[in-house]
Image: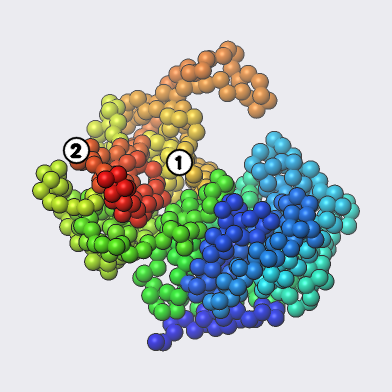
Amino acid sequence: MVNRFPALFSPIKIGSMEVKNRIAMMAMGVFSPRLMGPNGAYTKDGADYYIERAKGGTGLIVTGLLPVSWFPKGQGPGDRGEGFYKYIQQQKYLAEGIHKYGAKVMVQITALSGRSSIHSEDPAPSALPNVWDPTKTNREMTKQEIHEYIEMFANAALACKMAGIDGVEVHAVHEGYLLDQFTMEYANHRTDEYGGSLENRLRFPSEIVQAIKAVCGKDYPVSLRYSVKSYMKGYNRGALPGEKFKEFGRDYEESIIVAQKLIEAGYDMLDCDNGSYDSWFWPHPPVYMPKACNLEDVKMLKKHVSVPVICAGKFDDPELANEVIANGEIDMMGMARPLLADPDMANKFASGDLDNIRPCIGCHNGCLSAIFQGKDISCAVNPACGRELTYGIGKADRQRKVLVVGGGIGGMEAARVCALKGHDVDLYEKSGQLGGAFIAAAAFEYKEDDRRLLNWYIKQMQDLGVNIHLNTEITKQFINEHRYDDIFIATGATERKLSIPGFDSENVTYAVDALLHKDITGDNIVVVGGGLTGVEIACELGKQGKKVTVVEAADTILNTFGLSAANYNMLMEMLDYYQINVMKSSSVTKYENGMAHITTMVKNYPNVANRAKMMFAVGAEGIPQQSQIKADHIVVSVGYISDNQLYEQVKADHVYLIGDADKPESVMKAIWDAYDAARSIELRESRKLQHV
């Protein structure tokens, strides 16, 4: 078989370490107790998560970050106490498992967050406003603490080397973390040898790599996680792609000098992307960011440095990666979330099996958001992620006859899992195509990965031999007349409609119709509903140059549970950039003569001085304030109502209600509901037999 991507699958040297190909797994935090042990080493489950990606063909595994300062004295690898030796012993399983598949592994070690920490008492280079609560200030780090951190970095790196880990990555002059803040003038106001001149500002990360090399040897590979450009407009303000702005953080000119000086200090590789916590959608690009969003900046930096450079950030196209590597413009392709969605991605690149790659859709629900909720890292589209050896899909002891009602994402996932288990699956869809509500959700131009996921599911149905029946609505009578061992009701949901005077006008469109069929004409648009879909529609219309107002009944917008701050903050920047007016605590009460009549509940919120904003208190409910807005067109996006009528008619212990038919929520819920139910259908029978 001819290798379509010879440059991508060529070996590369990183210091003294040779990696078999140019595909690297980027760090994704793994902190939950099930995956990381009390000494910082990975449990068997945590290590198996990484080993699965090595098995899938990835050449270099960079683990999630290991905070050197997290552990009580003597308990972690940052000092030479009992925890140091426990870490070494426990981490050997990770190293040996990854080496078994010919891959290499680097552990990412970190000083953590500075002003980006959720704990405002954590130290920063100087006294700085906290990212998450700017009313609080992170204190200045002492020199003694700096020296202690440097020693902890060296100890942790030595523990990694003694465990058989191939190298370490220092995190980070990247993403606005503590070390990144030290390097930048906006954040470092120190007057000692760790502040002031650029050389002084680079002293902390320089002394870290020098300390590591002193204890581990000059030939022990040390990578640096590096943000080429900060894309900051100011504190808590990130710049959008293509936006004209004055850089508040690190710009191109300084970035080149910083990279060169840190390489002189001893770093063997730069693992690159962009951004900071103030522009979090650059290092953690949501669906709204363009593909390979950091590539041009990393290519620029590569021209000025002598060590290998990795590029990360929505970079999952092997053809593009092969081209830029062959041209010498970068050295390695970095992926994080795509390898959570499909751990076998590298092997599929190598075999040319690109149509069978399950794509990441940029939602962050199962990974970034879950991590910060204290949950296991996983993936919205791959429920087995993080529990590969304990939650996979095995063959059933006997074939069962399975009915799936509904051909949306949840229905297709149930059908897929049942077919993989060896069951005979009939899937009925009342419309003429598979996809359900996800077809409309994937309609935005930038949601190409949603469309890839939909096509992947349709291909799985075909390849696995699922019996597809379109244009057929299933009834209670049909189910009573046909014998099925198991039935999945995935009938989805219907759009919630509003009984408001004037909403029967042809100039009022509901979200699904707006996404799929109808051009929204006119210059003045009102979007009713400030949830995720409503805000996405508003931003898309604002991008077209329309004057858009979002009217939301709640006191806040974007109330989708689990929505990552990276996604949220980018949408908020987009609302500002496209000059979209947002009216909260407001409802449209009438649409007449091209005017939307709006009632806003004015509430007792204080002014910026935290004192009375009005001359009298208005009570908990507030007082209504009337206004009118010109509306050439109104788009309504106020959610969905579950369609569970069929389930209520036929429910039994072998009938499963899944996805939006149970509760309209997210793609992750639809897929995970279906996976969990389909994976465990045999348990129902075994429980029944136990009671006989």
Question: Which quarter of the image is occupied by the N terminus?
Answer: bottom left
Residue 464 in percent (x, y) is at: 27, 67
Pick whichever, 147 or 532, lies toward us.
147
Compared across the picture, whether 522 is left or right of 618 comes to left
**What coloring was used for the rendering?**
rainbow
Three-letter amino acid code of the residue under disc 2? Gln
- Of residues 519 and 335, the one drawn nearer to the viewer in this rendering: 335
Residues at badges 2 and 1 in contact (C-beta under 8 Å)? no
- Farthest residue in the bottom direction? 2
User: Residue at coordinates 82% horizontally, 64% vertically from top-left?
Assistant: 207
Kind of element beneath mark 2: helix
Sort mark 2 into few (<14), some (14-19) or many (20+) by Cα contacts within 10 Å: few
Residue 143 in the image, given as x and y percentages of width and height: 87, 52
The residue that appears at 59% across and 51% down in the rendered structure is 33
Q: Where in the figure is residue 391, as x and y percent of width and height?
A: 43, 58
State the residue in front, 260 or 121: 121
Apparent side of residue 575 relative to residue 477 in the rendered image (left or right): right
Give how far across and how far down residue 329 sits, in percent: 59, 77
Q: Which residue is mark 2?
A: 649
- Disc 2 vs disc 1: which is toward the camera? 2
Residue at 56% x, 50% y is 371
Q: Quadrant of residue 446?
A: bottom left
The correct choice, above or below, for 399 with respect to 112 in the image is below
Q: CA distance from mark 2 to mark 1?
A: 31 Å
Residue 442's disc number: none
Determine which quarter of the picture holds residue 229.
Answer: bottom right
Q: Which residue is mark 1?
A: 560
Label 1 CA crowd tier, 10 Å (few <14, some 14–19, many 20+): few
Give the residue type that dot 1 points to.
Thr
